[in-house]
Image (spheres, grey):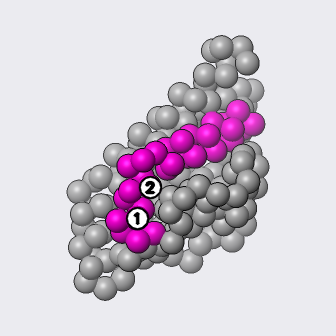
Amino acid sequence: MSMPSLPHVDEHTTVLDADTADAWRALGETLDESFTRRGAAGYARLVGCADRTASGPRPLAEGSAFPGFRVAAADPERELVLRGRHRFSSYALVFRLEPLGPGRSRLRAETRALFPGPAGSVYRALVVGTGGHAVGMRRLLAGIRRRSCAKDADGS
């Protein structure tokens, strides 16, 4: 898949005790749950996100949306590209899954974003410069890690 043409912001990685099929399921479910919460939808409205409601196919596929993001590309068990924009930024989250062996995989989450103009610079300082974005990404990956392992733990 083509890489979004936005400047690189950061990348976070975690190892999952799950194969890529279970990791893919956990990725989609966790993103959907995280970004459709009331607070996320309110924030999306506040900053003027293009996508403000959940819509489209589930499990996530190209054209699916939730507050703040639209699925730009989906290659199941390999890569998921989310795009979004609002008053202060155009951005993408790129999730990549790599098999590491039986029952293990690596998940990489790359953030790319453009923060145009003075308001964008202030927004970047508030979101990225304070470390808030990194904290949010680590929490998101931890949730995906927990959910991907839960299938094995309950036998489903």
Point out residue 137 in the picture as x, y percentages from the top left corner. 42, 48
Q: Which residue is mark 1?
A: 45
Nearer to us in this view, 96 or 123: 123
Q: Residue at x 30, y 69 (%)?
A: 124
Point out residue 54 in the picture as x, y percentages from the top left corner. 59, 55
Q: Residue at x 25, y 83 (%)?
A: 118
Q: Amino acid at mark 2?
A: Ala
Q: Residue at x 50, y 63 (%)?
A: 52
Residue farthest along the top direction in this orientation: 154
Does the magenta-highlighted stretch encompass residue 115? no
Under circle 1, the secondary element is: helix
Please state the extent of the stretch shown in magenta in the rendering: 20-49
Q: Are marks 1 and 2 in contact (CB under 8 Å)?
A: yes
Query: In the picture provided, is 53 more to the left or to the right than 8?
Result: right
Q: Give the numbered dot on residue 122.
A: none
Residue 141 visible in image: yes
Q: Which residue is mark 2?
A: 41
Residue 79 visible in image: no
Query: In the picture provided, is 148 more to the left or to the right than 67?
Result: right
Image position of 61 with respect to 143: above or below: below
Q: Residue at x 62, y 40 (%)?
A: 29
Point out residue 117 in the picture as x, y percentages from the top left corner. 31, 85
Crowding at mark 2 (Cα within 10 Å: few <14, some 14-19, many 20+): some
Point out residue 152 in the picture as x, y percentages from the top left corner. 67, 18
Nearer to us in this view, 74 or 32: 32
Does the magenta-highlighted stretch encompass residue 47? yes
